[in-house]
Amino acid sequence: MKKRLGQTVVLATAATVFAGAANAELNYDFLELRYVDAELDAGSNDVDGDGFEFGGSYKIADNVHLFGGYQTLDFDGVDVNALQIGGGYMTAISADTDLVARLSYIDGEVEAGGLDFDDSGFGLSAGFRRMFTPEFEGRIFVNYADLDDSGSDTTLELAGDYYFNNQFAAGLSLDFGDDATSWSIGGRYFFGAGR
């Protein structure tokens, strides 16, 4: 059921990515704070956790930006922390839509009952950002992570933000994967010249 719902949302979002025009510029200079709720598929039992994520992005050239984020989640006494830093390339495919590709380094840590497990690897992502109206941005990304000891996972990210003005936006994000599903809600503060 979750997979079918996810496929339906993906098709509906993809069908509207190129529809309409908002005539608003996308901004890659921001800081964000999000509350995250996650569910891990642990065989016959699912494990629920929640926490926070802090991140940001900074445009360093016309088509290049740097980004990073730190996420900390608690799964009933098991703490999962992850740091991600990287760079991205973006190109406009219409006045309101950017195609975005990103490469990142990921460093993760799991702490439980005095035990500590560290892992690291890389992440790749590709997708679209679109201003559907001057107040609403939608995003769709395919994210791939490959960690040295934990293996790899691919997720689909669907997100939307409502812009209260040129500096503040709030929104919801959904991530669907084989091993984990999560949603987050939060806000962005924009400090660059975009929008």
Image (spheres, grey):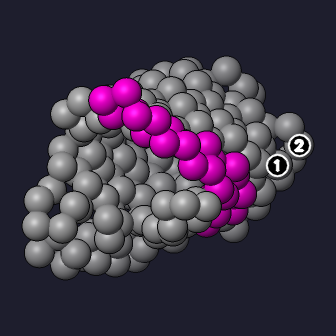
Q: Horizontally, is 54 left or right of 121 in the view?
A: left
Q: Quadrant of the C terminus?
A: top right
Q: Which element carries disc 1, helix, strand or loop? A: strand
Quadrant for residue 14, please give it: bottom left
> In percent of the image, x 23 and y 51: which residue is there?
39
Q: Which residues are magenta?
A: 100-126
Q: Is residue 122 located in the magenta-colored stretch of the structure?
A: yes
> In percent of the image, x 40 and y 76: which residue is there?
15
Taking the image as drawn, is residue 110 in sight? yes
Q: Horizontally, is 23 left or right of 52 in the view?
A: right
Towards the viewer: 21 or 163: 163
- Residue denoted by label 2: 61
| Badge 2 density bin: few <14, some 14–19, many ≥20, Cα 10 Å | few
Dot 2 and dot 1 residues touching (CB under 8 Å): yes
How far across and how far down the image is residue 23, in percent? 60, 49
Q: Amino acid at mark 1?
A: Val
Q: Which element carries disc 2, helix, strand or loop? A: strand
> In percent of the image, x 32 and y 65: which residue is there?
179
How far across and how far down the image is residue 192, in percent? 72, 26
- Residue denoted by label 1: 64
- From the viewer's perspective, is residue 129 above or below residue 59? below
Q: Amino acid at mark 2?
A: Ala
Quadrant for residue 10, please give it: bottom left
> In percent of the image, x 35 and y 56: which residue is there?
175
